[in-house]
Amino acid sequence: MTKPGGRIVMGNWIPNDPTLVAQILKISSAYSPPPPEGFISPMTWGVESNVIERFAGAGIPKDRISFVKDTYTFSFHAAPSALVETFRKFYGPTMNAFEAADKNGPAGDLQKELEVLFSSQNKSSREDATSIPATFLRVTVTRPYRLGSIDLPGAANPLSSRFLCTAGGSPKPTLAACSTIGA
């Protein structure tokens, strides 16, 4: 939630993307139990049409939502296999996959698959360093200013005062552009 005119900015991983995070999730899901019925993957926030639909449900028009594919680089001062260990200990999906794989026996296979993935995507020329770029969808949502009857912060008693506001050419209605319409 944000105030009128405020922005929400999110960085969302993109499903089925060939870069690191989507591939970690693909590999991990093969070793994990199925999600509970009705589970909606957080990865769906990386699909533009889903983002538009969800924000439209909150009253945000499509033209107030922008998308840019961007890159985050995982930089780690150790070999890719050490970064796999960090993900094993601290990243929920890989933690769950290893827990399930440990119970069923193929944890070594999961470890090998992830090490191959991390090594193949590592762009560092050093053996003791890891640099893996990963693509994400940067979403920026700007909440429209509500024109018409609105409550303004800073009013003497926002519970009893309502204001009729016009932007008057300004992109943002202000207290000076409003007149009291009653309590």
Image: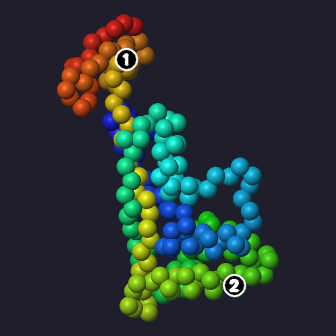
Image position of 150 with respect to 10: above or below: above
Residue at screen point 38% across, 64% down: 70
Q: Is residue 120 visible?
A: yes
Residue nearest the observer in this picture, 173 or 153: 173
In the picture, measured across the screen, residue 19 lies left or right of residue 126, that is right
In the picture, measured across the screen, residue 105 lies left or right of residue 131, that is right
Q: Earlier in the sequence, mark 1 or mark 2?
A: 2
Residue at screen point 44% across, 63% down: 136
CA neighbours of label 1 inside 10 A, class few (<14), some (14 to 19), many (20+): some
Image position of 164 with respect to 125: above or below: above
Residue at screen point 71% across, 49% down: 38
User: Farthest residue toward the left?
Assistant: 169
SS category of the residue bearing label 2: helix
Q: Which residue is mark 2?
A: 109
Quadrant in which residue 178 is drawn: top left
Return the x and y of residue 5 as percentages of the image width and height: 33, 36
Q: Quadrant of the C terminus?
A: top left
Residue type at mark 1 is Ser
Return the x and y of residue 167 as percentages of the image width and height: 25, 24
